[in-house]
Image: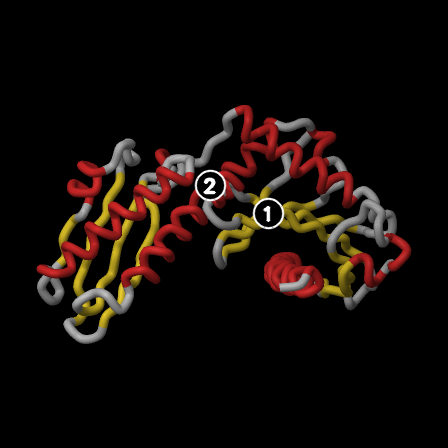
Amino acid sequence: MTKKTKQKDKDKWEREHVQRVLDYHNKKYGTHIAIKGKTTKVYPHLEGQLNWDWVCYDTKIGDEIAVEVKRLTDEKLEVRHNTIGDVLEEIKNDLSNKLPGIFVLSISISPSNYYLPPRGQQNKQKFKDVLCEAIFQTAQTLKLEEERGLTPQIIRQLPFALPEFFFCALYKVSDEGSALYKSFGVTGFWPPRLNEHELTKFEELVSHANEQLGQATNAKQTILVIIEEGLRLTIPDTVGEALKRVNHASYSQINRIYYLSGQEVEEIPLPTP
């Protein structure tokens, strides 16, 4: 995928989320705000300079509205998730067409102990080899629609510890064909946290958006859209509490903040200075 294509996909993704926020805002406040375009398309002279994401305007009264989009995620968790996903994809490819039927491999890990396999290519390969062997051997005796846990036999053969809440099982779907499907997730949830590290990161995110929106000198209103993405789960109340704990100067140029989680849109009240 080229850089230009990636940017196009990112713009399309952002536009869809911004439109959802505007639909919510228009319904709530009786306004008629629409997207005009990416800021650098509307104002080409801002290319390469600090600017915001989207220029919007009220179709009835003509007022301009500036919108900035920020992702709320945890990059470390994303990397760990992708690492596990890559290992499971390799196992699926290695075993498909070698199994007596169609099977589903289910793995769940507690988010509070979210690591697997431990760092290092050697540990990754060992985990893959052990899991492959456990799947292959179990598949030979598994009956149709039977599920069997693999955790004990995996643990016995690994030279390192698995996460405390680790579950792994194999389920036989059909006697016909030969394929392995994977189902990977987490058990439980990440509790919303406001430790000092996360609060600092959150303030940096808001402060940067504040600086960008501060450049929108023609805008009558500025909106920050925060999108919960990937594995960093939280709730609107947590974002609201975080705002109360950061410096007011970090969001002084922002008039409204909207938080998107899944299909839900919610406005986050700005604290009174």
Label 1 packing within 10 angstroms: few (<14), some (14-19), many (20+): some
Horizontal arrangement in the rendering, residue 243 relative to residue 129 (left or right): right
In the rendered image, is residue 19 in sight? no
- Where is residue 117? Give x, y as percent: 36, 40
Q: Which mark is residue 77?
A: 2
- Where is residue 44? Give x, y as percent: 87, 59
Q: Amino acid at mark 2?
A: Leu
Residue at the spot 40% in from the left edge and 52% down from the top edge:
85
Quadrant where the image shows the C terminus: top right
Looking at this rendering, what residue extends furthest in the front direction? 122
Q: Earlier in the sequence, mark 2 or mark 1?
A: 1
Q: Is residue 234 above or below residue 91?
A: above
Label 2 packing within 10 angstroms: few (<14), some (14-19), many (20+): some
In the rendered image, is residue 261 in sight? yes
How far is the residue under mark 2 from the one under mark 1?
Answer: 14 Å
Quadrant where the image shows the N terminus: bottom right
Horizontal arrangement in the rendering, residue 229 relative to residue 27 (left or right): left
Q: Tell me the element at label 1.
A: strand
> In front here: 53 or 111?
111
Which residue corresponds to mark 1?
Answer: 71
Colour mode of the rendering: secondary structure
- Where is residue 179? Give x, y as percent: 26, 68
